[in-house]
Amino acid sequence: MENNKRTIAIVIRIIIAFLFLLSAVAKLYPSPYFAISTFEVKQLYTMGFSEGFAPYFSRTLIGIEFALGLLLLQPHYLKRLVIPATIAMLVVFIAHLTIDTISNGNSGSCGCFGELLPMTPVEAIIKNVISVVLLIWLYRLLPADYKNRNIWVLTTVLFACILGVFMAAPIQPVQSGQPDLSEIQSAETDTVFEDDTNIIPADTATTATIPQDTPAATTQPQEAATAATPAPVTVNEPAKVKSVYSQYFPNADKGKKIIALFAPGCEHCRDAAKELTALKAKNKDFPELQIIFMDEEANLIPDFFKYAGAKYPYKVLDIITFWKVLGNDKDTPGIVYLWNGNIMKDWNGINEKHFVASELEKAYKKPYTK
């Protein structure tokens, strides 16, 4: 009987340790800084963490997960500190996930295993509840650990793991303020950004007339001048607004534009870019396409354009800024159809809102209606 208890205890320790180590490693996949930054934007920011505090919290949390996974495999303070601390962390996770599920439903990834193993909040709750039950069982199986009380083992492992995560993914400054537009790489001729005074609101019908002080107006009878006046022209387009994209491309809010948000190494992004190139070749009136790249595998941008079949103006943003521009709840590839800075239609990710070329073609050819 005693041997059976010992075997069960070892198995439980290995299972829980594996889950914690997998969770920590998954939050560093496919690359530490990219994974942690994505975790911060998609998980921590939505919970109310500030941009200054989130980078420290995320790395510390992952370090603690690593430490608990390792400490469950050693004997020191196992029953008195390690198991209770592990249960406490899981209970906090369960409470957060429960509140999130009640508020937002069982949609999206909880971030427990990062991008490696997407898991819904309900699935994560079930996993964590089972883990808590196993840990309680383990606590009851283990004898008191009076002989194994070297606190330095715990503190050394804990601080080493946290420091290791900070070293693997150093905190980097986030881009802020107006970018240097000279850094924008362009394969096309720059266009002039018109003054706001030349923009006509969509709900205003305007009439173009010949100025009354011209020779024609002063030498001809009033009836002739009236006859020469062009018919009123109604401007059927949305009023100009300032979009977030105008800080990266100075002409983004002028007329019809396509803004694409891509990761250079993303296969779905490459396929979307290829579809956009095909649309451009097919339609002479296709809006100008400009790309915002995530600064992850930026060295692949030349290969990206080679696969797409054309080069386009582009800007590279750091990972956190990129996610903010795309949207914390959205994913790549992101494609936005703008008209005078107004978002007329957009697509993102590879699920229900994935990019469909025929939808874009139909959208930009459709006349404007309020």
Image (tube, rainbow, N blue to C red):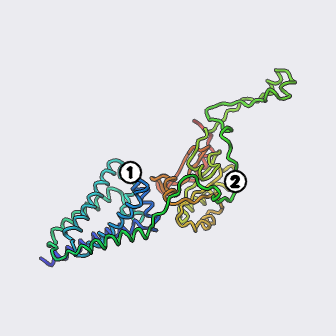
Upstream in the sequence, badge 2 or badge 1? 1
Callout 1, which amino acid? Gly
Q: Residues within 10 Å of mark 2 (few under 14, many from 20)?
A: few
Which residue, as the protein is rendered here, is positioned at the far right?
219
Identify which residue, 49 or 101, lies in the foreground.
49
Element type at mark 1:
loop
The disc placed on residue 312 is none
Which residue, as the protein is rendered here, is positioned at the far left?
1
Query: Residue 246 at x, y = what percent?
Result: 60, 49
Query: Residue 217 at x, y = what percent?
Result: 83, 26
Examine the rendering and report whether any part of residue 210 can be seen. Answer: yes
Q: Residue at x 40, y 69 (%)?
A: 165
Residue with the mark numbered 2? 190
Which residue, as the protein is rendered here, is positioned at the far bottom?
3
Q: Residue at x 31, y 54 (%)?
A: 96
- CB atoms of marks 2 and 1 within 8 Å: no
Give the alpha-carbon distance from disc 2 to disc 1, as whole Å.
40 Å
Identify which residue, 360 or 119, lies in the foreground.
119
Residue 308 picture quarter: bottom right
Q: Residue at x 15, y 68 (%)?
A: 140
Q: Residue at x 21, y 63 (%)?
A: 133
Examine the rendering and report whether any part of residue 134 can be seen. Answer: no
Callout 2, which amino acid? Asp
Element type at mark 2:
loop
Which quadrant: the N terminus? Answer: bottom left
Which residue, as the protein is rendered here, is positioned at the far top?
222
Residue 183 picture quarter: bottom right
The disc placed on residue 48 is 1
